[in-house]
Every structure is written in structure tokens, then in C-alpha cells.
Amino acid sequence: MNSTLVAAKPDCIDLGVLPSTLDPGIYSRAAIGLVVLATDQTVEHEFRQIFRHEGVALYESRIQNDNDITPQTLRAMQARLAPAADLILPGVPLDVVAFGCTSASMEIGEDGVFDELRKVRPEASFTNPVTAAFAAFKSLGMKRIALLTPYSEAINANLRVYFEGRGVAVTAMGTFLRTDDREAARISTDSIRDAAIAAAAHPDVDGVFISCTSLQVAPIARAAEAVSGKPLLSSNLVMAWHCLRLAGVDDPQPEFGMLFERGLAG
């Protein structure tokens, strides 16, 4: 048998402990945590389109949920919120933690969501699409909205009651009726744009809110507003805007709609 001679390797040169300094980190302006539904295909994609600011960093964790959206499956997520949030950058303070589900935030209740997140992230400010929507309505002076969703009639009815109980009139409502989250994520932006423009045309509507983090609205918000002359908001848009404003990031981004030229209302 032929043997192959292997040249002896030279001894490794020990460079020792290298000098280093620490910079402020990629979250030098804001560290934002996001709890995302296991089935969600959209919210992280849209957040990354929006969070392009130097020094603003987004970190996510996934929470188990069911594909079928019912009041029962939504409420079941409450006990999973704290463990999911606890996985985001352990030991690193976060400026804001957001829970990315509109219908679950309504079913659990905003305070119920925040109580769970506060167990593991007491240092942070908190938001979700419902809380962020009310902050956006206030900033834009919207008191009458058209509400568009992919939800069932039962969830739509609860959402309308929730909004109107907080002083925002739902004067028009429509659903794409895609209750499977995997299908909701594939509703085309053309469908969303056309529905939003039609809904905004009603004279008793101040603006349109599209509920559900699975729906893609960021790419078409500005164009739809140019046609209707009224604000077009979505779960992802209001939540991303609210995260930034809660973290003290006020940079205008008009390419994502009228809301992104506004700050928090006093």
C-alpha cells in the first residue's frame, strides 16, 4: 500500500488577547422586540421594510397559534405570551415589545396582553395592533373608520364592539373571509388596494383600517391614499409606527402613508 507523506504543519502563532472596544451596538437608538404568530408570513417582512433607521434593530420570537382564527384559539395564546417574549435577547433591555396579533389583542384585552409581557420585560413599553390603532386614530383625528378584515362575522362583530366601546365609530365594514391565516397572507395587494379605495369613498368615513398582521398593506398605502385622500392604516403599519414613536424615533417616512409623518398625539 502506498503511503502519503503529510508535511508537518508549522506551530500556530499565538496572537494573544486582542485589543478591542465596544460600540453602542446595532440597537444604539432602539431595540424593539416583536412576538409573531407561528403562522404569520407578513409582519416581519413589512417591519423590515419600515425599520431602515440607523441604530434601530428588530428582534422577534414566535408564539404557537392555530391556523383557524376563532375567539377560543385567540384567547388560548394568553398563557404563551410571556414565554415567547422571554426568548427575545435575554439579558438585553428592550425599549418596546409588541405582540403581533390584532384579533388576539382584542380577545385577550390590551391590558391582559401587557400584563403577560410585563412579567418578563418590565423595562419595556408595550404595544399591539389594537393599542397602536387607537394611538394612530388619535394622531390623525380619525373618529369614523371603515374596517376591513379577513375574519369571520363573529370576530368582526367583537372587533366593532371593541372599537366603538373606545369611541371610534365603525361606519363601514367588509371582510375578505379568509379565516385560515395561510390564505389571509396571500390576499393580493391589488385586492386590498381596491377594497380600501372603495371603502374610503364613503362620505362618513375618515379613513380605513385594515385589521390583520397577515395582510400586506405597506406597499400600497401611499398610492391608495393618493386616490382617496384619506388615511389607509393597517395592523402592521400602526404597530410599526407606534413601536418607533414609543422608542423616541420620530423620523418621517411618508412613503408608508400619512401616519408616518405624524408623532404621538398628546
Image (cartoon, rainbow, N blue to C red):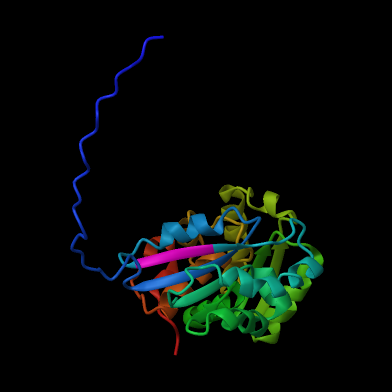
Q: Is residue 250 left or right of residue 143?
A: left
Where's the N terminus, which quadrant? top left
Q: Is residue 73 left or right of residue 214?
A: right
Q: Quadrant of residue 152?
A: bottom right
Magenta stretch: includes residue 58? yes
Magenta stretch: includes residue 75? no
Residue in the foreground of this view, choosing between 195 and 2: 2
Residue in the foreground of this view, choosing between 230 and 46: 46
**Residue 204 seen in this snapshot:** no
State which region is magenta: 56-60
Residue in the foreground of this view, choosing between 157 and 54: 54
Where residue 124 appears, as percent x and y from the top left, is 48, 81
> In the displayed structure, would residue 86 be above or below residue 195?
below
**Residue 108 seen in this snapshot:** yes
Q: Residue at x 66, y 74 (%)?
A: 105
Q: Residue at x 57, y 83 (%)?
A: 118
Q: Quadrant of residue 151?
A: bottom right
Q: Residue at x 24, y 29 (%)?
A: 8
Where residue 168 appears, as percent x and y from the top left, is 63, 82
Where residue 104 appears, as percent x and y from the top left, is 69, 71
Of all residues, the one furthest to the top in this rendering is 1
Where residue 222 appears, as percent x and y from the top left, is 45, 59
Q: Magenta region's main secondary structure?
A: strand
